[in-house]
Amino acid sequence: MALSFAKDIRPLFRYEDIECMTPMGIPLDDPAWMCVAENAQSVYATVADGSMPPGEPWPSDRVALFKQWMDAGCPA
Ligand code: HEM
């Protein structure tokens, strides 16, 4: 089945992720922002290098899923 932000990506973010990042202009729960390729790429960079979320890096399969979604064109 095709990947989508709503079904596959939005659930990867916890309440605290959204709460920390939205005031910094990075609304992880907002498809209007996240489904723009350059925004998704900036988010990807931090989960791929393990810097976000702080102290609790994503497992590699989750990083790979995010990459797969980006490669599919960041569908909402
Ligand atoms: C999956 C969850 C998260 C993602 C995808 C994420 C993403 C990002 C991104 C894209 C930046 C900008 C980095 C840059 O400009 O180089 C950033 C910065 C930052 N984030 Fe997050 N974040 C997450 C969770 C959190 C949480 C839970 C906190 C607070 C506990 C947090 C605190 C910060 C802070 C303080 C900065 C600015 C300073 C820094 O770069 O370390 N983030 N984050």
Image (cartoon, rainbow, N blue to C red):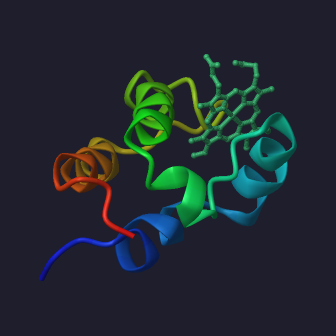
Q: Position of residue 31 (x, y in %)?
A: 54, 64
Residue 4: x, y in percent?
32, 72
Answer left or right for 61 relative to 40: left
Q: Which image quarter: residue 41?
A: top left
Q: Residue at x 62, y 54 (%)?
A: 28
How many circles with numbers are drawn on the protein?
0
Q: Which residue corresponds to the image point at 36% horizontal and 72% vertical from the top-left?
A: 8
Q: In the rendered image of this protein, does residue 10 appear above or below residue 17?
A: below
Q: Position of residue 73 (x, y in %)?
A: 23, 53
The residue lying toward the viewer, choosing from 61 and 7, is 7
Q: Quadrant of the C terminus?
A: bottom left
Q: Nearer the viewer, residue 1 or 51?
A: 1
In this picture, is 1 found above or below 46? below
Extreme-right residue of the structure: 23
Between 69 and 62, the one lying in front of the other is 69
Using the image, determine if residue 66 lies above or below residue 32: above
User: Image check: 48 left or right of 52?
Assistant: left
The reply, left or right, for residue 19 in relation to residue 33 is right
Please tell me which residue lies in front, 25 or 61.
25
Instruction: Return the x and y of residue 21 as percentages of the image width and height.
Output: 76, 43
User: Looking at the image, in which quadrant does ligand 1 appear?
Assistant: top right
Which residue is at a point 31% across and 65% down the rendered structure image? 75
Residue located 42% across and 25% down the image = 45
Q: Quadrant of residue 1?
A: bottom left
Residue at the left extreme, as displayed: 1
